[in-house]
Amino acid sequence: MSKTVLVKKIREKLDLSAKDANVALEAVLSAIEDGLKEEGNVTLTGFGTFKTVERSSRTGRNPQTGETIQIPASRGVKFTPGKFLKDAVK
């Protein structure tokens, strides 16, 4: 599902204008982003948990040349679905 389709579904469920639905979605996404930056995790009970994970540096290969390269350490995001979401998808 794309962001446009998600905005459309929000608009239909809440009887909002497209602009207001887009603002609402942007606010939620921004709040999740801020929570991950500040606290490292965001839990939406029943839906799931977003967590930041640390990736250590590692050695990799350039697929075109086969040359060995060093991939630097980085931070990423992991999502773990909650019980209600798992049950809804079954």
Image (cartoon, rainbow, N blue to C red):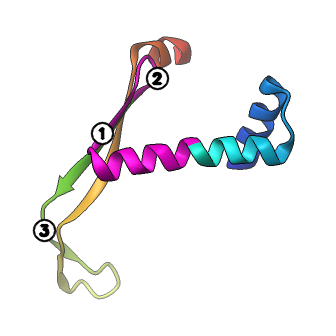
Q: What segment carries the magenta color?
A: 28-48
The residue depicted at 46 percent of the width and 23 percent of the height is 47
| For the residues bearing labels 3 and 1, Cβ distance under 8 angstroms | no
Q: Which residue is mark 1?
A: 41
Q: Is residue 83 above or below residue 69?
A: above
Q: Which residue is mark 3?
A: 57
Find residue 81 and report its horizontal and vertical position in percent: 40, 26
- On screen, residue 45 versus residue 7, left or right, reads left
Looking at the rendered image, the disc whose residue lies closer to the viewer, 3 or 1, is 1
Mark 2 is surrounded, within 10 Å at the Cα level, by few (under 14), some (14 to 19) or many (20 or more) other residues, namely some
Check if residue 41 falls in the magenta segment.
Answer: yes
Q: Amino acid at mark 1?
A: Asn
The residue depicted at 55 percent of the width and 14 percent of the height is 88
Kindly report the distance in space between the C-alpha atoms of the residues bearing marks 3 and 2. 32 Å
Find residue 39 and report its horizontal and vertical position in percent: 27, 44
Q: Is residue 45 above or below residue 55?
A: above
Check if residue 20 falls in the magenta segment.
Answer: no
Q: Which residue is mark 2?
A: 47
Q: Is residue 2 above or below residue 85?
A: below
Mark 1 is surrounded, within 10 Å at the Cα level, by few (under 14), some (14 to 19) or many (20 or more) other residues, namely some
- Which circle's residue, 3 or 1, is located before the other in the chain? 1
